Image (cartoon, helix red, strand yellow):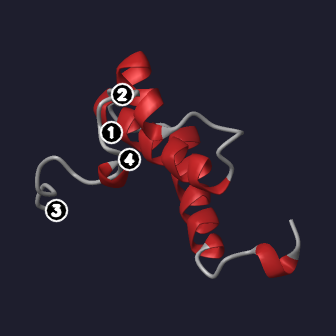
Amino acid sequence: MKESEVGPGRDRIEAELDLLNWHLRSGGTDQEVSSRLYAAQQALAWALEPEAAASPANLILGDRARPPMDIPEDSRGCLAVPRPPLS
């Protein structure tokens, strides 16, 4: 990738990936936390290189991740429900 193609947030994403990878390799977390760390790692990896990692929806939902064909094109990507509150 050329330097001009690197977005301003790429360094931040790569730093977060490094942190997630470190925690995943170091162990010491329970299964639930490890699963959440892995999901976050895969989502960020997919955002940087969609061909190299599973999409977050496909990783979690498998075949159920595909939207029904009757969703109007202009509403794809819209949330069906309000965003959940951040904890």
Mark 1 or 4, closer to the camera: 4
Residue density around tag 3, few if under 14, some if 14–19, many if 20 or more, within 10 Å: few
Residue lying at 58% horizontally and 40% vertically, measured from the top left: 25
Asked if marks 3 and 4 touch (Cβ < 8 Å), the reply is no
Q: CA distance from mark 3 to mark 4?
A: 29 Å
Q: Which residue is mark 3?
A: 86
Q: Which residue is mark 1?
A: 33
| Residue 66 placement (x, y as % from top left) | 40, 27
Q: Residue furthest top?
A: 63
Front residue (pair 23, 87)? 87
Mark 4 belongs to which amino acid? Answer: Glu
| Residue 59 placement (x, y as % from top left) | 46, 29
Q: Which residue is mark 4?
A: 73
Q: Secondary structure at mark 3?
A: loop
Residue lying at 45% horizontally and 39% vertically, measured from the top left: 56
On residue 69, which mark appears?
A: 2
Q: Seen in the image, is 42 located left or right of residue 2? A: left
Residue lying at 33% horizontally and 39% vertically, measured from the top left: 33
Q: Secondary structure at mark 1?
A: helix
Mark 1 belongs to which amino acid? Answer: Val
Residue lying at 57% horizontally and 66% vertically, measured from the top left: 13
| Residue 71 placement (x, y as % from top left) | 29, 37
Asked if marks 3 and 1 touch (Cβ < 8 Å), the reply is no
Q: Secondary structure at mark 4?
A: helix
Q: Which mark is first along the chain, 1 or 3?
A: 1
Q: Which mark is first along the chain, 4 or 1?
A: 1
Asked if marks 2 and 1 touch (Cβ < 8 Å), the reply is no
Q: Seen in the image, is 3 located left or right of residue 28? A: right
